Amino acid sequence: MPSLQVRDLPEHIYQKLLADAKSQHRSLAQQAVVVLSKGLETTDSPKDRRKKLMSRIRSRSPGTDAARLKAPRDLIREDRER
């Protein structure tokens, strides 16, 4: 997950963010993410993002990764033969 570092943050903004984080029982970083997402008007909740990701995974062609994977019995056999 990407990270963000903010330099030269005005003290009054930091204090406000810290107070809001404490009142919402969040960390400072969590509160900053909430404030940024509201300010940027992003509406996807984590649940919605998971649904979108799962639909993308399901839409992938089924044979792409399965063809590269070995059967469990073959993996066990290789391990025993070492």
Image (cartoon, rainbow, N blue to C red):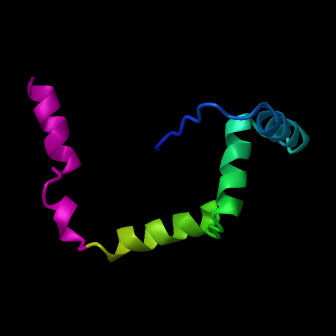
Q: Nearer the viewer, residue 16 or 82?
A: 16
Please state, as top left, top right, bottom left or bottom right, where the C terminus lies in the image: top left
Indicate the position of residue 78 as horizontal and vertical percent values.
Answer: 11, 34
* For residue 62, above or below residue 39: below
Q: Residue at x 77, y 35 (%)?
A: 14
Identify which residue, 44 or 63, lies in the foreground.
Answer: 44
Q: Is residue 34 left or right of residue 16?
A: left
Q: Residue at x 54, y 65 (%)?
A: 49
Q: What is the magenta range?
A: 61-82
Q: Main secondary structure of the magenta part?
A: helix
Residue most extreme to the right = 23
Look at the image and say whether residue 53 sits in the magenta stretch. Answer: no
Residue 22 position, x and y percent, is: 87, 36
Does the magenta-highlighted stretch encompass residue 75? yes
Whether 81 is drawn above or below 36: the answer is above
Q: How many marks?
A: 0
Tell me if residue 13 comes above or below residue 43 in the rendering. above
Residue 40 left/right relative to 50 = right
Q: Position of residue 53 (x, y in %)?
A: 45, 66
Residue located 50% across and 39% down the image: 3
